[in-house]
Amino acid sequence: MSDTIDKQPNTKQPDAAPAARPARGGALLGDEVFTRHGEGPPPRNLAEHAYFSVWDLHAYYGESYIVQGVSFQVREGEILALLGRNGAGKTSTLRAIARVDEPAVRHGEIWLDHKPLHAMKAHGAAQSGVGLVPEDRRIIQGLTVEENLQLAQIAPPVGWSIERIYDLFPRLGERRKQEGTTLSGGEQQMLAIGRALARDVKLLLLDEPYEGLAPVIVQEIERTLEEIKRLGMTTIIVEQNAIAALHLADRAIILDMGEIVFDGTAKEVLDNTELRQEYLAI
């Protein structure tokens, strides 16, 4: 299989997308900026040497063009906040990285620790170290908390021990014999994160981890994510609560209509009222 995905869509081609708006903020990969599709050959040597990188990613739901030439990189141990209004393409970008069936990636490259994720399906990406915690959590009905965690470790590579996960989430330890789907929303979020950590995760993808949770539970999840940050786990977080995500993150990317409009530090976004109002409505 070729390392580059470049399937021909039925109708609209990535080349037909509107010209990209220049992203505000810092450059990608030092002084180098990825080129868009159709503007020259991919800088493959740069993409392959970043710990995690996305080059010129184009993804579709059917014929709906959702992710439009997205390129960025994440350094090892960094937390990146992927932000934008509803419908900006945040979750779609996260799902494309995790190589789930939808959205369908029709062009682009995705590299993690020198491995081409774009040449893999979701199972291969997971085995290569991608841990996706989806917004709907996907707790398996009929299984206890502990059985959900054990199932995550049924095939290698195995990550954290179950006891270590209970140390991080004492509530899960207290409820280890309780059916997972009967937990509160906050506890289910803890279980979903714990299940990802039960694998040998190199890149943790968090989709709306605070969604629908009470403020006191959000604070508890925040403390957990601060601990994950302290441990140096490379993480991309999609979160509608942008301020909370920015306080956690090192860097931020803002998407608008499937394109990157800002790539820089989280502090830059927090300090730029005009930018936040224009693209995040905060």
Image: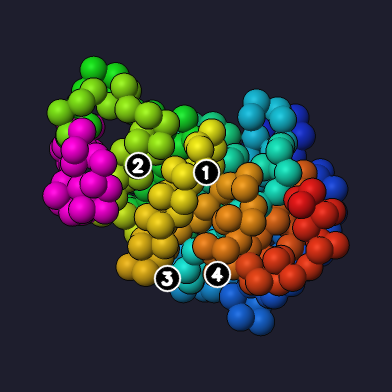
Where on the picture, by quarter, is residue 106?
top right
Q: Which of the two discs, 2 and 4, sits closer to the camera?
A: 2
Residue type at mark 3 is: Glu
How far is the residue under mark 3 from the one under mark 4? 12 Å
- The picture places residue 245, in percent across and down from the top left corner, at 57, 56
**Which sits earlier in the primary sequence, circle 3 or circle 4?**
3
Q: Mark 2 points at which residue?
A: 190
Left or right of 175? Residue 266 is: right
For the magenta stretch, what is the residue range?
147-175
Q: Residue furthest bottom?
A: 31
**Which sits earlier in the primary sequence, circle 1 or circle 3?**
3
Left or right of 32? Residue 114 is: left
How far is the residue under mark 2 from the one under mark 4? 22 Å
Q: Which mark is residue 91?
A: none
Residue type at mark 2 is: Met
Residue 224 appears in the figure: yes
SS category of the residue bearing label 3: loop
Query: What colour scheme has been applied to the protein in the rendered image?
Result: rainbow
Q: Residue furthest top?
A: 142
- The picture places residue 267, in percent across and down from the top left corner, at 66, 71
**Which sits earlier in the primary sequence, circle 4 or circle 1?**
1
Q: Mark 3 points at which residue?
A: 76
Assess disc 2: are there few (<14), some (14-19) or many (≥20) residues with their C-alpha within 10 Å of its C-alpha.
many
Q: Mark 4 points at which residue?
A: 250
Q: Name the residue under label 1.
A: 215
Q: Which of 62 and 45 is in front in this view?
A: 62
SS category of the residue bearing label 4: loop
Left or right of 247? Residue 34 is: right
